Image (cartoon, rainbow, N blue to C red):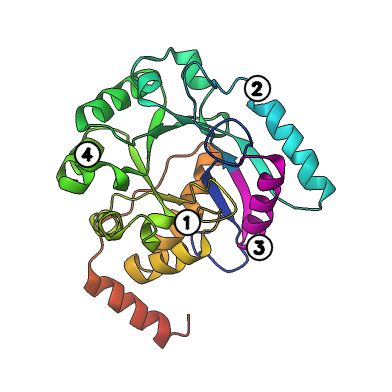
Amino acid sequence: MSAGGGPSLQFIDTHCHIVPGVDDGASSPDVSLRMARIAVADGIGRIIATSHIVEGYYDGSDLEKRLEALRRLFAEDDVGLELIAGAEVPMSICMAGEKQVLADLTLADGKYLLMETADTTYDQVARAAYHVRLCGFLPILAHPERTLFVQKDLGKLKELLANSDVFCQITASSLEGLFGKGIQKTSYSMLKAGVVHLVASDAHSAGRRKPVLSESKNLLVKAVGEENAAVIMYENPARILAGDDLLQKPAISRQEVSKRSFLARFMGK
């Protein structure tokens, strides 16, 4: 896939709670179907279903069976959306889970593990990331812009990423301001610092938190330029599915974005 991010490319949503009845996401198969229609209309062709893993409630062991039921439902309604297995894994499992337990929860049965970071501390995330790496997997931090220690001190996150193979996935709605100006500001600070590798919908419904990525892609182009936006929105999600290393884009200045935007307009791109 080219990093050029042309209009013919489809999005891959790497974080979505579309599986019904297992967490705080889709409440029924009908809601899942409505979410799928919204996703396809927005240009999403594939979704990694990342249900919350909750110890003592849902362990993800029957996820493929649940996905197959959704695939049949979508096919009956002629909704062309591909579903791929994944999970959003809590800190407790990331810090102490056995290797096989983590392997069963990776994105697309690959080498990346999506770590839940809500209500966590720097020390917890650092310990969890170390354990995940020790087990042979690469941690992706889910919505770190909504984590208090990142909002207070972005330097701590940069320190963590500099010392280990850890990646960041921010939520589209954070960029759009759905969670408030503070989280939106942190999201843009992360982009400016070059520590955002992925943007995903983290959709939970067909309403307020729906599976759409096109608006965040437009915001990314304005914030970091077309090339960086294409890496974040198209190239890196495809690399997760292929099992390839994620690209890490450098921090980019406002002047460079303005320069690139001018050149793009001048050259008719």
> Which is more N-terminal, label 1 or label 4?
4
Asked if marks 4 and 3 touch (Cβ < 8 Å), the reply is no
> Disc number at residue 62?
2
- The kind of residue on which mark 3 rests is Ala
> Which is more N-terminal, label 2 or label 4?
2
Q: Quadrant of residue 131?
A: top left
Question: Which residue corresponds to mark 1?
Answer: 233
- The kind of residue on which mark 4 rests is Ala
| Residue 49 is a magenta residue | no
Magenta: predominant secondary structure element? helix
The image position of residue 269, as x and y in percent, is 48, 80
- Between marks 4 and 2, how big is the CA–CA gap? 36 Å
- Between marks 2 and 3, how big is the CA–CA gap? 29 Å
The image position of residue 158, as x and y in percent, is 21, 43
The image position of residue 212, as x and y in percent, is 54, 58
Mark 4 against mark 1, which lies toward the viewer?
1
Which residue is found at the position 28% from the left and 41% from the top? 147
- Between marks 2 and 1, how big is the CA–CA gap? 29 Å
> Disc number at residue 162?
4
The image position of residue 67, as x and y in percent, is 69, 34
Mark 4 against mark 2, which lies toward the viewer?
2
> Disc number at residue 41?
3
